[in-house]
Image: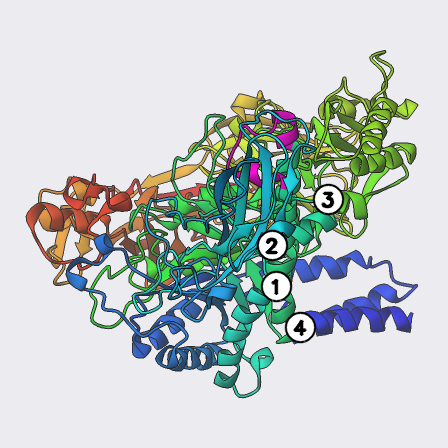
Amino acid sequence: MENIVSKDISIYLKWVKQGLATPLLILGVFTLCMFSCNPKSSKPIGDITYNLLKNGFEQPNDSARAKVYWWWLNGHVDTLRMRTELKAIKEAGLAGVDIFDIGVRAIGNPDKMIPAGPSFMGEESLKTLKFVLNEAAKLDLDVGISLSSSWNAGGSWVKPKHAAKTIFYSKKVFSPDTKNNKFLPFPIIAPDKRGKARIIEYAADGKPKYYEEVSVIAVPYGKQNLNDTTGIINVSRFFDPKNQELNWEPKTGKWDVYRFICSNSGEQLIIPSENSEGPIIDHYDAEATQMHLQYFIDRLQPLVGGGLKESALKYLYLASYEAKEYSWTSSFPNAFKELNGYDVHKFLPSLFNSKMFDSSLQRRFDHDYAETFSELMIKNHYGKAKEICNQNGLLLCSESGGPGHMHHIPVETLKALGALDIPRGEFWYERPYFNKDSIDMVWLVKEIAAASNIYKKGWVEEEAFTSYKDWQESPATMKPFADRAFAEGMNRLVIHGFTHNPSEYGYPGIAYFAGTHYNDKRVWWSKVKPFNDYLARVSYILQNTDFVSDVLYYYGEEIPNLVMPKNTPFAIGKGYDYEVINTDVLLKELTVENGKLVLPGVATYNVLYVSEEELSPRTLKKLEELVKMGAVIVGKKPKAIIGLRDKRAIESFNVLVNGLWGEETGDNTSANGKIDSKSTPLEALKSLGVSPDFDYSDNHIDQRKAPLDYIHYKKQDLDFYFVRNTTDQWVTRNCSFRQLGKQPEIWDPISGQINPVAIYDQQDDRTTLPMTLAPYGSHFVVFREGDTKGIYKRINVLEEQLPRIQYTSEGPIFIDKGTIELEDASQNMSKVDIRPEVTILEGEWNVNFPENWGAPKTTVFPELISWTEAKDDGIRYFSGTATYHKTFNFKKTDDKRKVYLDLGQLAEVGEVWLNGKPLGISWTQPHRFDITDRIFNGENKISVEVANTWSNRLTGDGINGDTFTQTNIVKANKNVVAWKDLPLRVSGLLGPVTIQSYNIH
């Protein structure tokens, strides 16, 4: 027993060090542990986990809190403002910053209003970094630093040897009569993809300072659609690079002779600050990565007294890989042969002549070619960078190999993300960017979550709310996007982004051209902490529990291979979820226990789905092992082998395919040791008796169109379902969960409140309960050990007649007027008349506006309207915070009733005081406050501060030529819409404001 307690406490002490628990909590946990380890006690050990998660949910720690990109535009900084901004970040409930030095495009720098600062990582820059690290340490903020000014990785310190490389060629026709013309010209350094001269260093002889001979290859003249390489000759050994002569004489016929060299591609940083330009590194070369990382380490180390490990600097960040040029690296030929077993050189001409080989041969070579680059980048860039970071007490974070569907992605994405300490993806706010298959191209969450899960990384970070909407967003409009990301597996946000604003700039200030401008110059910034608390509460639970799904989806061996957004295009069906697995983890980790597929230390699954039509013998062999162990596998029968393989491999492939899928006899079920090609994953689950994990009456077969979305996590005997309303309407449903013998609770991440569910029924393997979600609302439904019967079993009305329900610690409240029947645990019926008392605060409101922003200091609104409907231009175009005041009378009719203040509609964030006492901040529907113990019989006074966005003031300035605002963003929506043409956004307190009284049942 002592050993058990000692082990538990050591774990919790480790959590304290990592910021996952507090010492005070440990004392409580120790007490619980001693109590639960006592044989005379019936207190379950599970209560320890419950209390840890409950405490972390109510008061999330920094590991769960969002961070921000901290943009340093053009390297122009102001340390006094930096100190202010860091304090603002801390006070807003954020956990840290990713420092991102970045340039400014010409359109975003009118009249050079943002001057050029010092070069990134130069002496002046290092002084600023030292200052920031010291200030962040005082505030207990985490700091990350991007490994370049803008992206990709690189800088002025990158020499040609370590800079990005590509391959060039020259071609000359050789024949038996060319004996006296053996000269093979040096390849022309062709322009880049944009048609511009490459920015590379040249020697006095006109050749690049850096280049290497690759090979010389002879191809029969004019040959096309070859199905092998037997007629192609590697004549490199006959070539003398000094005199550039090829001492090879073909005996017959004409030959196209290619001379290939490797040299710099000239690719530069994308948008560096003006004094920080430079080439990007060779991302496939471990020596280049070593040089680049060590450059940063050597300069950062002297900035902190106790070493990097003890400083505020926690990780280095590699941004998304968005290189455009064709890549090469010196080690590629050897790596290719080691990985694939054959020589790459004879295939090099096909890189520039797509018709040289037949399509089948070319496709299979392309796979091997891509896989080699993938392995080089994962090992020599991401793996090497992680190794160097870890050696210096830092973590590595990256959007590795992309991510995404818009860029040149040279890696197997899940494996690349798995090579990091912290995998990161991204999602955008209101950016329609769909391909022909209606796939959301900028939604990169499921991929990151899958990599984090199967590689046991824990973190699923997301660059969040990237946008071109320029101050039009609010916490309420951002929430649905965050919730969608949470429902795909995100567990920490890095908000894109907080632009640093030196002191000389006004409001809304300068901003990076993309991203949600999430800084202390936002109108609603002083009221943003509850939104950040919300994000942290959800993140905390998802960080500290384990993802649950029924199907393991093997996404094949293509490279690049992208995981699309959840349920796109792969989906199982209503109420089921899935995990994605790659070849690496499939081969190394996946096993079977008791008929279930198992990833040790990760999760178990009921079914493995294999969809790819091209597989390798190694994968088929693994599938054969899994089938023999009793795995249930469904999937299409492969039609081709992937990659180039010898004859024996192809024969083995055909034998394995026929053995696993069988001949076309229809006898191909897993029970007979075959893979079922006839069934879908859904049919396989049904045949196993696996019911939906989450369901309700109008659940949609296309889960992307369903009114409710969910994700399921688990820790020991606790189950957490995050359920979100995908619509802008109130939704009340009888929801059923695949849970039995547990007590349900509602954990509200907006308020942090935890309330028992009083109405639920348990039958078969399911618990059914009615619940209500506000427009775009969300909460956790949590199942814990406890009562298996609620106060009531069900509400006996038709689904469409269910009243809106609010669960409280004292019992349920029914919001909508009407009559219902409640059935209790003993099947007794009781009729309930729902009679809410609603008082509308009608009449005029006194409103105060701040001075010097165009609106009158005080005014009277006869009724509540949007500011944009006011006749006064100063109010119509007002951006800022206005305060509403009203005095009203109220008479309590029943002291047992719950009394609420409901603000109705407001835009965008409101803070309320009743009788001089604060009620709190409301940023999303419902804008309701429990005032049972705050409201007086008789006269009451209410004050409501409402903050909108900068959008309307920017529009007003554009229309009237006013200069209330100052910014470098000359047009909205990615510099497309003139401010004067941007529609005004509804603003202010819209109401109706009501006092509502309810009975508790």
Q: Are marks 2 and 4 in contact (CB under 8 Å)?
A: no
Which of the two marks, 3 or 1, is nearer to us in this view?
3
Front residue of this view, candidates 64 and 117: 117
Q: Which residue is mark 2?
A: 377
The boundaries of the magenta stretch are 346-363
Front residue of this view, candidates 890 and 343: 343
Q: Which residue is mark 4?
A: 16
**Which residue is rendered at x = 78% and y = 72% of the image?**
9
Instruction: Tell which circle, 3 or 1, labels the residue nearer the N-terminal end.
Output: 1
Using the image, tell me which numbered label, if any, was put on residue 128. Answer: none
Gap in Å between the C-alphas at discs 3 and 1? 20 Å
Q: How busy is the neighbourhood of tag 2: few (under 14 within 10 Å), some, or many (20 plus)?
A: many
Type of amino acid at the residue the image marks with label 4: Val
Instruction: Tell which circle, 1 or 4, labels the residue nearer the N-terminal end.
Output: 4
* In this rendering, position of residue 442 left or right of residue 637: left
Q: Which residue is mark 3?
A: 340
Q: Which residue is mark 1?
A: 286
* In this rendering, position of residue 944 left or right of residue 158: left
Residue 473 at x, y percent in the picture: 33, 47
Gap in Å between the C-alphas at discs 1 and 2? 9 Å
Residue lying at the far bottom of the rendered structure: 305
Gap in Å between the C-alphas at discs 1 and 4? 36 Å
Instruction: Tell which circle, 1 or 2, labels the residue nearer the N-terminal end.
Output: 1
Work out which quarter of the rendered image holds the N terminus and state it: bottom right
Type of amino acid at the residue the image marks with label 2: Met
Which of the two marks, 2 or 4, is nearer to us in this view?
2
